[in-house]
Image (tube, rainbow, N blue to C red):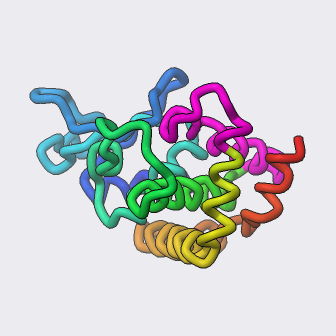
């Protein structure tokens, strides 16, 4: 899975780098920055994706396949933080993020408990993007309202993320048992466990 995810991103123009202290980000390659891929062809790889581990890599790949291309921070307009999840644009950003949380939990290489912990962590760090810094209850209440009002929209984005991840991994050479997630993480159950803990 690691090899296929890395190849998928390289084919789209991004070098993948792992580091324990990585910021889990997509950025443009700096001028004259060397390329660490086997080909060493930095000109063909205008972006760098820095991640801490495989779950982060899958989360970033999910963002890329939803967007349809590699772009700095997935084209997210960070200058507009905090995002308003009650607007169509804010809800789109929220649902794409939730879909990436679900899809990367589905593909998480650890146990089901590890996948749940990953999902909870990834949802929890959204507080700073949606104006709920340090207030997880307010974040969860806002998410719950938007999900209840637009559930079909969220389900469609989650399904798209799963399908596009599987295609990207298959295209990059992953065998079927790798291109299919080890579990189909259920948003409803994951959300219930998150808010009940």
Q: Position of residue 145 (x, y in %)?
A: 66, 59
In front of the other: 24 or 16: 24
- Locate residue 189: give its quadrant: bottom right
- Locate residue 186: give its quadrant: bottom right
In front of the other: 54 or 143: 143
- Residue occupying image coordinates x 47% and y 75%: 167
| Residue 119 included in the magenta stretch of the image | yes
Q: Position of residue 31 (x, y in %)?
A: 10, 29
In front of the other: 123 or 52: 123
Q: Which residues are magenta?
A: 110-139
Q: Position of residue 70 (x, y in %)?
A: 29, 54
Looking at the image, residue 43 sits to the left or right of residue 52; the answer is left
Looking at the image, residue 65 sits to the left or right of residue 138; the answer is left
| Most common SS among magenta residues | helix
- Image quarter in which the N terminus is found: bottom right
Q: Is residue 52 visible?
A: no
- Residue occupying image coordinates x 16% and y 50%: 44
Looking at the image, residue 73 sits to the left or right of residue 122; the answer is left
Looking at the image, residue 104 sits to the left or right of residue 62; the answer is right
Q: Is residue 107 visible?
A: yes
| Residue 123 included in the magenta stretch of the image | yes
- Image quarter in which the C terminus is found: top right
Q: Report how many numbered discs are placed on residues in the image.
A: 0
- Residue occupying image coordinates x 33% and y 38%: 78
- Locate residue 133: give its quadrant: top right
Q: Position of residue 50 (x, y in %)?
A: 41, 35
């Amino acid at each position: 899975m690691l090899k296929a995810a890395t190849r998928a991103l390289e084919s789209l123009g991004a070098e993948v780098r792992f580091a324990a202290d990585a910021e889990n980000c997509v950025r443009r390659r700096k001028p004259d920055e060397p390329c660490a891929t086997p080909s060493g062809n930095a000109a063909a790889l205008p972006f760098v994706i820095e991640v801490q581990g495989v779950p982060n890599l899958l989360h970033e790949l999910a963002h890329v396949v939803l967007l349809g291309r590699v772009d700095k921070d997935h084209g997210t307009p960070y200058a507009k933080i905090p995002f308003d999840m009650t607007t169509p644009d804010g809800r789109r950003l929220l649902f794409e993020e939730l879909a990436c949380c679900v899809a990367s939990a589905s593909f998480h290489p650890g146990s089901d408990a590890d996948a749940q912990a990953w999902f909870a962590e990834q949802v929890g760090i959204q507080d700073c993007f949606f104006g709920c810094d340090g207030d997880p209850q307010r974040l969860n209440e806002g998410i719950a309202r938007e999900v209840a009002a637009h559930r079909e929209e969220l389900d469609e984005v989650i399904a798209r993320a799963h399908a596009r991840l599987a295609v990207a991994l298959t295209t990059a050479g992953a065998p079927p048992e790798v291109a299919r997630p080890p579990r189909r993480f259920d948003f409803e159950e994951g959300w219930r466990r998150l808010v009940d803990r």
